[in-house]
Image: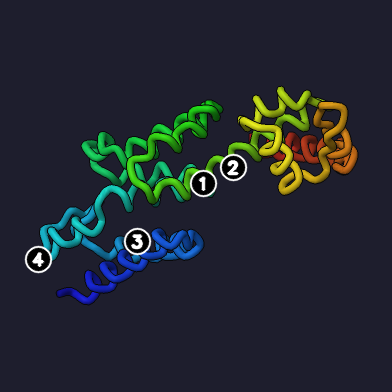
Amino acid sequence: MDPKLVEVTQLFERFKAAFVRNDFGACTNLLSQLKVLLTKFPSLPPSYQETPNAVQELAIAKYPILGLNLLRLLVQNRIAEFHTELELLPQSSLENPCIKHAVELEQSFMEGAYNRVLSARQTVPHDTYVYFLDLLAKTVRDEIAGCSEKAYDYLSINDAKKILMFSTDQELSEYITEEHPEWEIKNGCVFFQKAKESQPCKEIPALQLINQTLSYARELERII
């Protein structure tokens, strides 16, 4: 068997073993290595070359791995790379549940339909997707939290739970303790004012911008 094929097969077995023992840090690392090694398979997109090992190569690089890589890019907010990878896949692959799930997640994320993103955990096409969806859920909540503290001085606990999509007061409290200790819970509300006060006020260099604009205008006149 081709040495590269042996290496990828062994790496994929290690990935599955790491997932079974819930070693998600190792899963992420191994997935990155798999992605690099799979690019050396000429039978995969975009080349689609007929090679002696094409069947084995395609068997190893089935849609769960491609879908996981798309999820990884989405979790890391590398949207441009997400679309680049997507364009390399054949049109027919978009109907595969593993790829379709990732595409729908990206659409929901970009549309701000965060409830759909969080509920997607219940419809994963493969068990290995759960870890990345948990990471994506944290990314979504952090995005909502950042917007909330800029838009409001405070929210009732019930409203905060609804916005951050937590089902219990305990979940909300733990999230605030771990992720936003600058927030304050009192009198049945979550106060963001403390967080706002801790943020430095940035001065806009108005004079510098005016001088730059005038300089550009003078240069434009010379060109014309």
Asked if marks 2 and 1 touch (Cβ < 8 Å), the reply is: yes
Q: Nearer the viewer, mark 1 or mark 4?
A: 1
The Cα atoms of the two marked residues, 2 and 1, are separated by 7 Å
Residue 207: in sight, yes or no?
A: no
At label 1, counting other C-alpha atoms closer than 10 Å, the crowd grade (few under 14, some 14-19, many 20 or more) is many
Mark 1 highlights which residue?
Answer: 75
Residue 70 place in picture, x, y as percent: 40, 46
Please report whichever mark, 2 or 1, sits nearer to the chain's N-terminal start: 1
Q: Amino acid at mark 4?
A: Pro
* Mark 1 secondary-structure assignment: helix
Give the residue at x 39% y 45%: 84
Please report whichever mark, 1 or 3, sits nearer to the chain's N-terminal start: 3
Residue 24 place in picture, x, y as percent: 48, 59
Looking at the image, which is closer to me, 213 or 74? 74
From the viewer's perspective, tell me whether residue 137 is left or right of residue 56.
right
Please report whichever mark, 2 or 4, sits nearer to the chain's N-terminal start: 4
Q: Amino acid at mark 3?
A: Lys
Q: Amino acid at mark 2?
A: Thr
Mark 2 highlights which residue?
Answer: 139
From the viewer's perspective, tell me whether residue 91 is left or right of residue 141.
left
Q: Amino acid at mark 1?
A: Val
Q: Quadrant of the N terminus?
A: bottom left
Residue 78 place in picture, x, y as percent: 51, 47
Mark 4 highlights which residue?
Answer: 52
* Mark 4 secondary-structure assignment: loop
